Image (cartoon, helix red, strand yellow):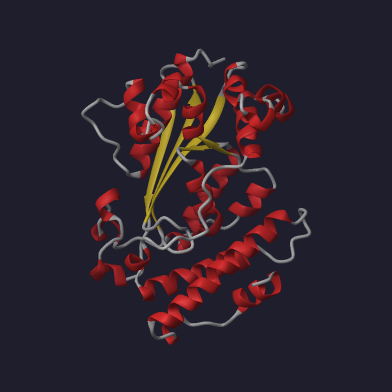
C-alpha cells in the first residue's frame, strides 16, 4: 500500500455491518491498520502547515477500525500484533522532557546527555527540576489504540516539590458500545472496571466536553505517565487535537519509566526478569507502596502512586530546586 492508496482506504465508505465472515473482516482490518500507520507517518513527517491531509482522517479511520474489530471479536485479536502502539518515546522526546522539567534549553541537555543520549541520567541530576506537571493514566480495553476503547482517565495536577505537594485530581469513566453489556468489559481482570461502572457514560470519542478539558490540561502543562509511549499512542488516535498539539510542541510527554531507568541506581543492580522499572516495583523501593500492596490499575489511583514515587526519587537524588 502506498500513500495514495492509504488515503483512498481512509476515505472509503465502508459499513462494518455489511461485511460478513472472518475473511472479509480480517482483510478490512489489515488494510485499515496498514493505512493508519502510513498516514500517521506521512502526517508527522510533513513540514508544519504542509500536511497532505487533516489528522481527522486518521482518527476517523481508527474509529472505523474499532467497529471492524468489535464485529470480528476483540478477544480473538488479543495475540495478534498491531502497529499503532509505540514501544517508547523518541530520543528527541526524552531530551525535551528533561529540558522542560529543568527549564533549560534542549541543546544544553543534549550536550550533557552525549551521543545517543547515553548519559541522559547525568543531565537529569545536573540541574534542579521544578514546576507544575500533569500526571495521567489511561485504562483501556486493548493494547492497540486503533482496536479498543479508553475506559478510564485519571488526571492529577502536581507542583513538583519534596514534601507537602499540592495536588488536584480528577477521574472520568467512559462508555462502550452496547454489545459489551452482554460480552463483558474487555480486560476486566486487570482494571476491574465493570459494565455497571460505565453503563451511563459516553464513550471517550463522543465525550467532547471531556476531550476539550483533557486537551486544555495537556497543552497547559507537560504530562507525566509511566511508559508514556502508551498514553501518547492512545491519545494520538483518540483525542481530537492531540496530534496537532503534539506536533506543534504544545504537548510534552515525560516518561516516568525512563526516569526510573536513568536515575534509580538500584534499577541497574536488579535482574531484568524482576521488572524493576514497573511502577509497582519502583514504588515499593521508594516506600510509596508497601511490600504487601499492589498497584490498583485504575487511573487516578495509579497517577497518585506514580507522582508520589517520582517525587520520592527526585527527593532521594536531591533534584528539587
Q: Is residue 91 left or right of residue 231?
A: right
- Whether residue 165 is visible, yes or no, is no
Q: Is residue 18 left or right of residue 60?
A: left
Residue 305 lies, in percent from the top left, at: 36, 32
Task: Name the quadrant of the N terminus.
Answer: bottom right
Residue at position x 40%, y 26% from top?
309
Task: Name the quadrant of the C terminus.
Answer: top right
| Farthest-out residue, left | 292
Residue at position x 60%, y 65% from top?
58
Q: Is residue 19 left or right of residue 110?
A: left
Q: Nearer the viewer, residue 252 or 124?
A: 124
Residue 150 lies, in percent from the top left, at: 41, 56
Instruction: Give the quadrant of residue 99.
Output: top right
On screen, residue 135 above or below 107: below
Instruction: Give the quadrant of residue 156.
Output: top left
The number of callouts visible is 0
Residue 95 lies, in percent from the top left, at: 64, 32
Q: Nearer the viewer, residue 321 or 85?
A: 85
On screen, residue 220 above or below 312: below
Amino acid at each position: 500500500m502506498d500513500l495514495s492508496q492509504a488515503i483512498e482506504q481512509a476515505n472509503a465508505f465502508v459499513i462494518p455491518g455489511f461485511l460478513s465472515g472472518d475473511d472479509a473482516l480480517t482483510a478490512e482490518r489489515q488494510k485499515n491498520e496498514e493505512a493508519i500507520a502510513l498516514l500517521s507517518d506521512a502526517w508527522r513527517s510533513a513540514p508544519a502547515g504542509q500536511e497532505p491531509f487533516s489528522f481527522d482522517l486518521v482518527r476517523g479511520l481508527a474509529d472505523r477500525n474499532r467497529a471492524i474489530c468489535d464485529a470480528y471479536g476483540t478477544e480473538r485479536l488479543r495475540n495478534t500484533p498491531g502497529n499503532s502502539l509505540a514501544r517508547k518515546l523518541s530520543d528527541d522526546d526524552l531530551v525535551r522532557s528533561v529540558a522542560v522539567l529543568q527549564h533549560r534549553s534542549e541543546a544544553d541537555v543534549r550536550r550533557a546527555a552525549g551521543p545517543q543520549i547515553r548519559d541522559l541520567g547525568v543531565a537529569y541530576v545536573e540541574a534542579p527540576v521544578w514546576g507544575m506537571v500533569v500526571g495521567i493514566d489511561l485504562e483501556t480495553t486493548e493494547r492497540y489504540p486503533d482496536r479498543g476503547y479508553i475506559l478510564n482517565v485519571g488526571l492529577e495536577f502536581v507542583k513538583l516539590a519534596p514534601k507537602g505537594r499540592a495536588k488536584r485530581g480528577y477521574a472520568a469513566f467512559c462508555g462502550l458500545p452496547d454489545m459489551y453489556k452482554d460480552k463483558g468489559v474487555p480486560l476486566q481482570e486487570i482494571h476491574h472496571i465493570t459494565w455497571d461502572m460505565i453503563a451511563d457514560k459516553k464513550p471517550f470519542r463522543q465525550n467532547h466536553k471531556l476531550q476539550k478539558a483533557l486537551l486544555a490540561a495537556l497543552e497547559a502543562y507537560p504530562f507525566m505517565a509511566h511508559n508514556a509511549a502508551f498514553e501518547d499512542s492512545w491519545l494520538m488516535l483518540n483525542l481530537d487535537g492531540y496530534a496537532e498539539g503534539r506536533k506543534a510542541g504544545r504537548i510534552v510527554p515525560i516518561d516516568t519509566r525512563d526516569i526510573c531507568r536513568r536515575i534509580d541506581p538500584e534499577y541497574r543492580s536488579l535482574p531484568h526478569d524482576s521488572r524493576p522499572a514497573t511502577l509497582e516495583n519502583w514504588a515499593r523501593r521508594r516506600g510509596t507502596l508497601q511490600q504487601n500492596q499492589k498497584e490498583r490499575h485504575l487511573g487516578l489511583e495509579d497517577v497518585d502512586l506514580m507522582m508520589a514515587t517520582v517525587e520520592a526519587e527526585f527527593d532521594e537524588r536531591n533534584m528539587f530546586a
